[in-house]
Image: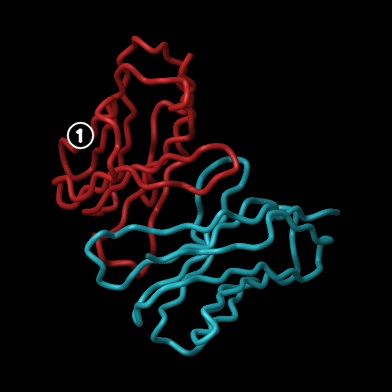
Amino acid sequence: DTEVTQTPKHLVMGMTNKKSLKCEQHMGHRAMYWYKQKAKKPPELMFVYSYEKLSINESVPSRFSPECPNSSLLNLHLHALQPEDSALYLCASSQELRELNYGYTFGSGTRLTVV
Amino acid sequence: AQTVTQSQPEMSVQEAETVTLSCTYDTSENNYYLFWYKQPPSRQMILVIRQEAYKQQNATENRFSVNFQKAAKSFSLKISDSQLGDTAMYFCAFMNYGGSQGNLIFGKGTKLSVKP
């Protein structure tokens, strides 16, 4: 398995809703990442997990809460989002935090719309 | 701070022709990686090619090759024999070697359209 799988592919949520994004990989990668990508913009890093521990939080608002239950799974819990949080949320993984022989493997993303 | 600049927001090329996408970057580091990623309408970011800064030889992957000029901090992507499936957004990206953050820094992207 050489893929990063993200679910759901599309999500519409109200500003008072609680939802979660899921990311899964079975490549044995020990670093996993959440990126946010607005339309026609490059991805921006949100969180980095290394060996299931949060390594980097790029000053992301607390309404985004990441979780790494095990080495294969990365979640992003969403609560009280704003319309400006609407974006494509990309998950990625790499063998190690600083091992880049193969770069990152990205998922296809979750298109989030906040109404 | 490192920055990546892609000066061509959009480009088009005829099928079977060759096209070159430009990328420049700014860093004070000596060891780093450079990447080109492709993002088609399907949204998945796909690694096209990578280059380690300590290697002088330009990387090639089938129809894709780079022109890496370290002194000029330039990292262009050449696509030969362009195919319709090459239509996508192309992002140039940079990462420090051995950096503690593991953060890929992306340029703003070049939208490439391959025309039949």
Q: Colour of chain B?
A: cyan
Crowding at dot 1, Cα within 10 Å, few <14 / some 14-19 / many 20+, comes out as: some
Q: Amino acid at mark 1?
A: Glu
Q: From the viewer's perspective, is B77 left or right of A47?
A: right
Which quadrant of the view contains residue A66?
Answer: top left
User: Total label count?
Assistant: 1
Q: Residue furthest front?
A: B1
Chain under label 1?
Answer: A
**x then y, percent, for residue B9:** 68, 55
Q: Position of residue A8 (x, y in %)?
A: 41, 26
Q: Please tell me whether residue A115 is drawn above or below residue A51 in the rendered image.
A: above
Residue located at (25% from left, 59% from top): B101
**What is the quadrant of residue B60 in the picture?**
bottom right
Residue drawn at point x = 57 percent, y = 37 percent: A39
Q: State the SS at label 1.
A: strand
- Residue holding disc 1: A67
Colouring chosen for the image of the structure: by chain
In the image, taking residue B5 as reference, residue A45 lies left or right, namely left
With respect to residue A94, does A63 lie above or below?
Answer: above
Query: x and y percent of residue B49 in the render?
Result: 51, 68
From the top left corner, tell me how far across and down residue B39 is, in percent.
57, 49
Looking at the image, residue A50 sits to the left or right of residue A108; the answer is left
Residue at left offset 56%, top offset 54% = B108
The hue used for chain A is red
Residue at horizontal 53 percent and vertical 58 percent from the top? B107
